Image (cartoon, grey):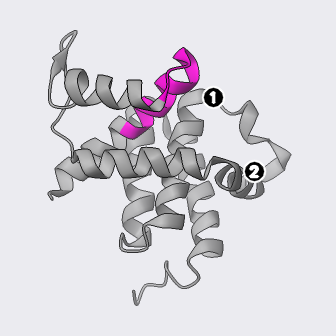
């Protein structure tokens, strides 16, 4: 497992969640599409890096299996009473994937999870939105992983 393949898997998860919501595609269709046509391929001039497929599947499945509690936690972390359903689709996907990793992948350090999804946000958005992803995931991490952001860890 390489860091680059994990990063590519995270980006693919966000893109897959977006596709599922916008195009109303099912999980098996998304797995097949991403694994055979996107991951590690060039499409319309964009190179999609090789990704760790098992990690891609685990995070995507984890988001879907835990979406209701994940969405409640994101809603609680959003400030100003701005509900998750009013957030732009790709931003929702980023927050859901990051929230799943904070909840379900305790083996991945808290700072790594936050940085990775902040980087994914940077691929789609400007500094305001990137800052929002950082703030929401940081708030969630403090609830889900007390002490996980301590400088000693």
Q: Considering the image in quadrants, where does the C terminus appear? A: bottom left
Residue 31, placed above or below residue 9: above
Residue 102, placed above or below residue 107: above
**Which residue is at 41% across, 68% downward?**
111
Looking at the magenta stretch, what is its main secondary structure? helix
Where is mark 1, residue-wise?
88
Return the residue nearer the eye: 93 or 138.
Answer: 93
Res 131 visible: no
Return the residue nearer the eye: 152 or 41.
Answer: 41
Residue 58: image tag: none
**x and y percentages locating residue 102 in the rendered image:** 50, 65
**Which residue is at 22% across, 9% downward?**
44
Q: Say if the magenta span includes residue 22.
A: yes
Crowding at mark 2 (Cα within 10 Å: few <14, some 14-19, many 20+): some
Farthest residue toward the bottom?
152
Farthest residue toward the front?
28
Farthest residue toward the top?
44
Disc 2, SS: helix
**Which residue is at 74% across, 53% downward?**
72
| Sequence-first disc among 2 and 1 | 2
Where is mark 2, residue-wise?
75
Q: Say if the magenta span includes residue 75.
A: no
**On the image, which quarter does residue 31 sit in?**
top left
**On the image, which quarter does residue 42 sit in?**
top left
Q: Distance between the residues labelled 2 and 1?
A: 14 Å
Magenta range = 13-26
Q: Are marks 2 and 1 in contact (CB under 8 Å)?
A: no
**On the image, which quarter does residue 91 sit in?**
top right
Image position of 153 (left or right of 98): left
**x and y percentages locating residue 35 in the rendered image:** 24, 31
């Amino acid at each position: 497992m390489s860091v680059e393949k994990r990063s590519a898997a995270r980006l693919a998860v966000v893109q897959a969640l977006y596709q599922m919501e916008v195009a109303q595609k099912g999980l098996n269709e998304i797995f097949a599409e991403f694994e055979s046509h996107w991951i590690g391929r060039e499409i319309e001039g964009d190179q999609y890096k090789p990704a760790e497929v098992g990690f891609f599947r685990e995070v995507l499945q984890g988001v879907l299996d835990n979406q209701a509690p994940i969405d409640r936690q994101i809603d609680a972390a959003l400030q100003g009473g701005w509900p998750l359903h009013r957030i732009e689709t790709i931003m929702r996907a980023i927050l859901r994937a990051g929230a799943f990793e904070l909840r379900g992948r305790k083996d991945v350090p808290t700072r790594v999870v936050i940085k990775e999804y902040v980087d994914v946000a940077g691929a789609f958005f400007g500094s305001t939105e990137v800052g929002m992803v950082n703030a929401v995931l940081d708030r969630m991490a403090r609830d889900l992983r007390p002490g996980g952001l301590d400088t000693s860890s």
